[in-house]
Image: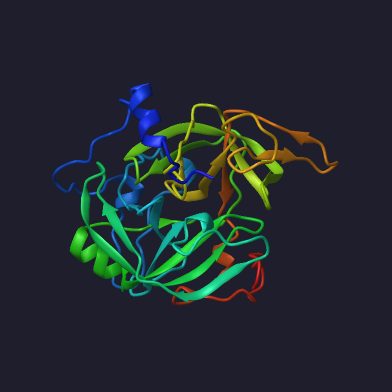
Amino acid sequence: MKKPLIGVLTALLLAGATALAAPAAAAAAPSGAQGRAISADRVDLAGPPAQAQPAVAVSFAGTVALSNCSGSLVRMPNSAAGDPALVLSNGHCLENGMPGPGEVVVGQASSRTFSLLNSTGGKLGTLRASRVVYGTMTDTDVSLYQLNTTYAAIQSRYGIAPLTIAATHPAQGASIKVVSGYWKKIYSCSVDGFAYRLKEGEWTFKDSVRYTSSCNTIGGTSGSPVVSTATGEVVAVNNTGNEDGESCTVNNPCEVDQNGKVTVRQGINYAQQTYGIPACFAAGNRLDLTRAGCTLPRP
């Protein structure tokens, strides 16, 4: 799990972690795909097809910092501007602790706060949750908070549009960026492949994204959006990595293939795909786990 661990700050100081970006002092207007305007009814996604566009300039715009993790302000492909806004992070970042295997949290009251960031990582303001819409560490590692405000209100006050969760499976070799609001750091790499099963302690995740080695994420990057540089959309949520070379233990996940073969990749990090989430949301950003195509675990 990529939550802050005891000694992380000390380790960073000893290692001379100079790559951490300092937050900007003033708000900057978002740019590129992350700064597209919201119309009166829907987020404006007009423009040429994604494949015809150059690489998106991914920034911190739309990301958030939690007390112990990273996250992002997100929308479904068909979310409307007047819908209650959502924040995406990890299930293991929930304020009440990590859900056990088979546990699914739905509709739990929450007043958690999030620091909304501008394109350079400066804090624009504080967003507040009204409830945990969904959270689990079964098959995936995801949490979705509903805020007490709308996308339109956030756009109007802060000039920030949400990131869109892609409804399609990412491709091997795709260029991605992992954007940590907690550390104000952006990691750049590619999708190296997919783990059929990723086992970590008591938990098992399905069809996990494996990064190439340059995304050397650390504690505090949990919940960071994994953003496609081709479309600017969220394709996964960062959650873990094998730190010490141990096999299938907490902070040392192992890959298990269809035949049960276990592979340990020390120093390699992972994310959980998010393309299955939009199918579970009806109009108005309403969670409906019974919708056709929804495969998220149910309570």
Q: Can residue 282 be seen in this view?
A: no
Q: Is residue 207 visible?
A: yes
Give above or below for 188 relative to 171: above
Residue sticking out furthest to the left: 26
Q: Nearer the viewer, residue 159 or 90?
A: 90
Name the quadrant containing residue 8: top left
Quadrant (top left/top right/bottom left/bottom right) for the C terminus: bottom right
Residue sticking out furthest to the right: 259
Give above or below for 112 relative to 7: below
Q: Nearer the viewer, residue 142 or 155?
A: 142
The residue depicted at 49 percent of the width and 27 percent of the height is 214
Is 187 left or right of 207, judged from the image as shown? left
The number of numbered discs placed on residues in the rendered structure image is 0
Q: Which colour scheme is used?
A: rainbow
Q: Nearer the viewer, residue 94 or 161?
A: 94
Give coordinates of residue 276: x percent, y percent: 60, 59
Give above or below for 275 relative to 257: below
Is 236 left or right of 161, judged from the image as shown? right
Give coordinates of residue 94: x percent, y percent: 47, 61
The residue depicted at 27 percent of the width and 46 percent of the height is 31
Give above or below for 197 relative to 128: above
Give coordinates of residue 101: x percent, y percent: 67, 60
Quadrant (top left/top right/bottom left/bottom right) for the N terminus: top right
Name the quadrant containing residue 98: bottom right
Is 72 left or right of 286, judged from the image as shown? left
Give coordinates of residue 29: x percent, y percent: 20, 49
